[in-house]
Amino acid sequence: METLEEFKYALKEIWYFRLWIYGKHFEFEWRYRNWTTDTKILELYNFDKELRFLLLEYLDIIEQSFKTALIRQLWEEFWTFWHSNISLFDCDWQKNCWDLVQELLSGIIDWFKNKNPSDQRTYTKDILTHYYSNYSWPEYPPIRMMMHLMSFGECVRLYRYLTPTNKIILANHYKLNWKLILWWMYCMSNFRNTCAHWERIRNKVFVSQIQKPGLIWLDDRNPKFTDSRNKLFDYVLVMYLLMNQIWYSHNMWDRIQDLLNKYDINFQPMWFPNNRKDIIS
């Protein structure tokens, strides 16, 4: 956008207050800095949008991997209706743990049963109709079907309710401690919602702080986490570490590098180190 007319056109299509959020980064004492231009504001907006879409692509891979692990790892250990087995859940840490599991699963089933027939996801409702028209037991559909109904956050909740022994079964798939994988997936589910709901991410300070992993293949002599551990770089690094376990030939970091090099903006609010080439070895 090189002319004022083009910027005016962008305002009509993007919505003034959404652009204004990015324009505030160029303010000082309630005024725009002298070097502020419409191009710089739009570049910041476009960078945040492209980065959000790029990360959302990999967050989708992480989400599907976690759901598949919940299906396959525990299915192979037990059976396809393992989520209906009270003995697999840690009901000692909270007296009504099994009630929470049933509340979670029943709430998901009821929500889909009561959906408007005109909703675009009627295919999912048809799956439930087929199951309950042919089976009256077990109470809940097989886990492969439940994973199709559950959100990322709901899957994390189900994983949280499992006994530590069963959490380890899934965590071993990622070669991670179960406490770490539980917390990382919780953070990733929240981060996924942030990206999907059009929130800015460049200078966001996240509520949940990322925990540093005690992994042999993470060089502690050259710490790669910021002290705060709740900035964008911390979340992106966790995504990269997870992708290394999930996808043997992904190019996530190269694509992020290309995007960072594409725009002439300040990367400090994201806490990306200046020498980004040495971050990932």
Image (cartoon, rainbow, N blue to C red):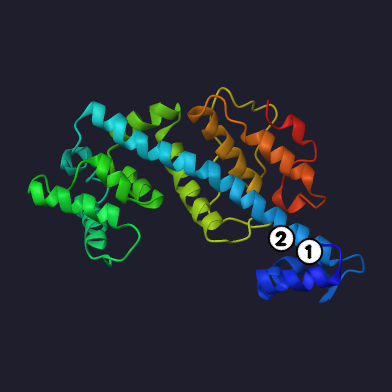
User: Can you see residue 202?
Assistant: no
**Quarter of the view holding residue 227:** top right
Q: Nearer the viewer, residue 71 or 43?
A: 43
Residue at 15% across, 48% down? 131
Query: Residue 182 is drawn in which quadrant?
Result: top left
Residue farthest along the bottom direction in this orientation = 30
Residue 197, numbered circle = none
Could you tell me residue 267's position as x and y percent?
76, 49
Q: Is residue 46 above or below residue 21?
A: above
Q: Front-most of 167 and 32?
A: 32
Give the secondary structure at mark 2. helix
Image position, residue 12 (x, y; %): 69, 74
Contact, CB < 8 Å: mark 2 with mark 1? yes
Q: Horizontal placement of 44 versus 165: left or right? A: right
Task: Please name the amino acid that badge 1 sits on.
Answer: Ile
User: Could you say where residue 120 lies in the image, as x and y percent from the top left?
Assistant: 35, 60
Residue under the image location 33 percent in, 43 percent down: 159
Name the one closer to the observer, 209 or 146: 146
Vertical comparison of 14 with 97: above or below: below
Q: Residues within 10 Å of mark 2 (few under 14, many from 20)?
A: many
- Measure the alpha-carbon separation of dots 2 and 1: 6 Å
The answer to whether 56 appears left or right of 93 in the picture is right
In the image, taking residue 143 as reference, residue 226 lies left or right, namely right
- Identity of the residue drawn at 71% across and 57% down: 46
Residue at the spot of label 2 = 45
Query: Label 2 is placed on what type of residue?
Result: Tyr
Q: Secondary structure at mark 1?
A: helix
Residue 162 in which image quadrant: top left
For disc 1, the marked residue is 41
Q: Which quadrant of the rendered structure holds the C terminus?
A: top right
